[in-house]
Amino acid sequence: MRNMDRRSFIRSALAGAGALALPWQAAPARAQKAKFAAGDRVVLNKTGIVTSRLAIGSGTNGFNKVSKQTRLGTDTFVGMIREAFDRGMTFWDMADQYGSHPFFREALKKVPRDKVVILTKVWTRDAEGVKADLERFRKEIGTDVIDILLLHCLTDENWTTKMKATMDVVSEAREKGRVRTFGCSCHSLGALKAAADSDWVEVLLSRINHRGVAMDAEPSAVVPVLRRAHDSGKAVIGMKIAGVGELRDEISQSLKFVLGQGFVDAFTMGFESVDELDDVIGKVAAVQV
């Protein structure tokens, strides 16, 4: 299929994908196979936040305020964010570590704020540092309210005890109307288990794919933890679907595995071109579980 034809087909498919997807429990038996669209409107479990199934990521190899997406330059990356919005992707995934806040600020000049869900992540561990970072983030992004704020890249299995003061700062930010919901991203199985068991965590960003590449542990160990977290009401957002590029040729298999679990409310991926975005949109539409 020629490129323009494929894009037209995708736009048409997205226009018809308007049904509200409710958060799943353990996957029930179905008379018909479930189908998906990247632009499906999904509910992030008990947070009540409604957004697209696919989030536009900005942190491929993201560290020290740069990523593959920010290296594209403002015009190219912001143009891709807007193209994604036109295709139904209203979930924006950013982080201080990626240096991506200013790019999304530029995108907000052309996209209505109330039409997108903004997720960002704070690396700072101490309470006063997080308080200062949150105020800086709102200015950098150009928004009064951050929809989802995550404590970034937690590895300590005792983080819920050691970071209590930091968690309190985030809770206070919601009371003041600066954050809608919060949680964490984890980079160890111990930290993930602590997050799943925490009453404070409302959103859990977790690495998941069919082969366990760049994950906290093998899928057989991670899946039960995430299922428990989702069953308790937490929103589960998947990341590393392509295994930091190692699964580039197995994205269809990874998507089938992730979407078939029934507890992954949404997932994030970073793209370096509109063609890559369109390719994944097509692969999501082809998944049947």
Image (tube, helix red, strand yellow):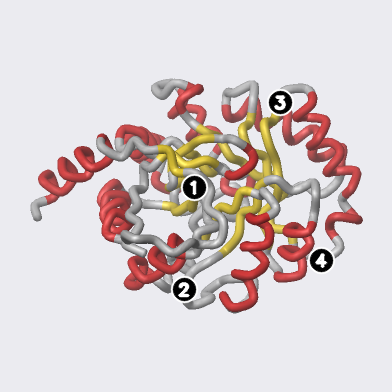
The residue labelled by disc 2 is 210
Question: Which mark sits nearer the N-terminus, 4 or 1?
Answer: 1
Q: Residue at x 16, y 44 (%)?
A: 9
Residue 130 position by quadrant? top right
**Residue 121 horizontal/vertical position (percent):** 65, 45
**Residue under the point 30% across and 38% down:** 87
Foreground: disc 2 or disc 1: 2
Q: Using the image, tell me which numbered label, if any, was put on residue 142.
A: none
Residue 281 horizontal/vertical position (percent): 30, 51
- Camera-near label (4 vs 2) is 2
Q: Position of residue 193 (x, y in %)?
A: 75, 65
Residue at the spot 36% in from the left edge and 64% down from the top edge: 289
The residue to which callout 4 is attached is: 157
Q: Which disc, if any, is residue 58? A: 1
In 3D space, how far apart are the residues under numbered discs 3 and 1 (Cα atoms)? 22 Å
Mark 3 nearby-residue class (10 Å; few <14, some 14–19, many ≥20): many
Which residue is denoted by mark 3 in the rendering? 178
Depth order, front residue of 242/77: 242
The secondary structure type at the circle numbered 1 is loop
Point out the tag, 3 or 4, that comes first from the N-terminus.
Answer: 4
Q: Give the structural element (helix, strand or loop) at label 3.
A: loop
Residue 79 seen in the figure: no
Viewer-side label of 3, 1:
3
Q: Earlier in the sequence, mark 4 or mark 2?
A: 4
Would you call the spot at circle 4 few (<14 residues within 10 Å), some (14-19), or many (20 or more)? Answer: some
